[in-house]
Image (spheres, rainbow, N blue to C red):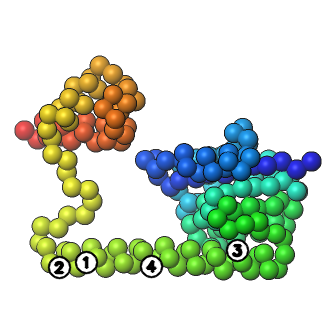
Amino acid sequence: MSKLYGYARVSTANQNLDEQLSELKAVGVDSQNIYAEKFTGTTTDRPEFQKLLQQLNANDILVVTKLDRFARNTREALAVIEPLLDQGTIIRVLNLGTIENTPMGKMIVRTLLSVAEMERDMIVERTQAGKEYAKKKNPNYREGRPRRQIGEHERAVYDYLKSHSANQTAQAFNISRSTVFRVKKQIELDELIR
């Protein structure tokens, strides 16, 4: 009897898994069979992914929202996908379709992964070129997010955090936990510098 499994992944802690989880549940994957994690795709040694691989058998169906949830480059993704296909696991990619263990199925996977990797590389290349241009044209250019201006709102967040958890503070001010920690860090750093 085949089972339906789902895998969801985002690369960083401040990204959200909700959309992927909703999509997996919408196609019938039971919550207890969904393996989800916030972990970089640059490695296939991801805890939840490894647990999932141990569960999969022939004729089981593994559902992912996009092909790049497996890995960030073609070689690593193929190292995961091809053995799954060889063992008889069926892979269903929601924005693509079902991938079968046929020469055509494997060729489609290789082609799509190569295109996705090329697109990522081009984005990195354009980003680097933009940074170089900005550095040449603006002597005050700094990479990264501009420092938040500390105002009354940020002070209120910081004061509230003194007697509440980060989760409670984020909820009370309708901001993310990472914003709470950024405000805390900036205020404490500013006070240290003074």
Which label lies toward us, 2 or 3? 3
C-alpha span from label 2 to label 4? 21 Å
- Which mark is first along the chain, 1 or 3? 3
Q: Is residue 83 above or below residue 147?
A: below
**Mark 1 secondary-structure assignment:** helix
Residue indicated by mark 2? 136
Q: Quadrant of residue 143?
A: bottom left
* Residue 47 visible somewhere in the drawing: no
Q: Amino acid at mark 3?
A: Val
Asked whether residue 167 is in view, the answer is yes
Q: Say if mark 1 contacts mark 4, CB within 8 Å.
A: no
- Check disc 4 and report the residue beneath it: 122
Q: Which residue is mark 3?
A: 109
Q: CA distance from mark 4 to mark 3?
A: 20 Å
Mark 1 to mark 4 CA distance (whole Å): 15 Å
In the image, farthest residue toward the right: 1
Q: Are marks 4 and 3 in contact (CB under 8 Å)?
A: no
Looking at the rendered image, the disc whose residue lies closer to the viewer, 2 or 4, is: 4
Tell me the residue at 20%/36% (across/down): 154
Task: Give the CA distance from mark 1 to mark 2.
Answer: 6 Å
Q: Residues within 10 Å of mark 1 (few under 14, many from 20)?
A: few
* Residue 114, percent from left and from top: 60, 78
Instruction: Please say if 44 is above or below 15.
Output: below
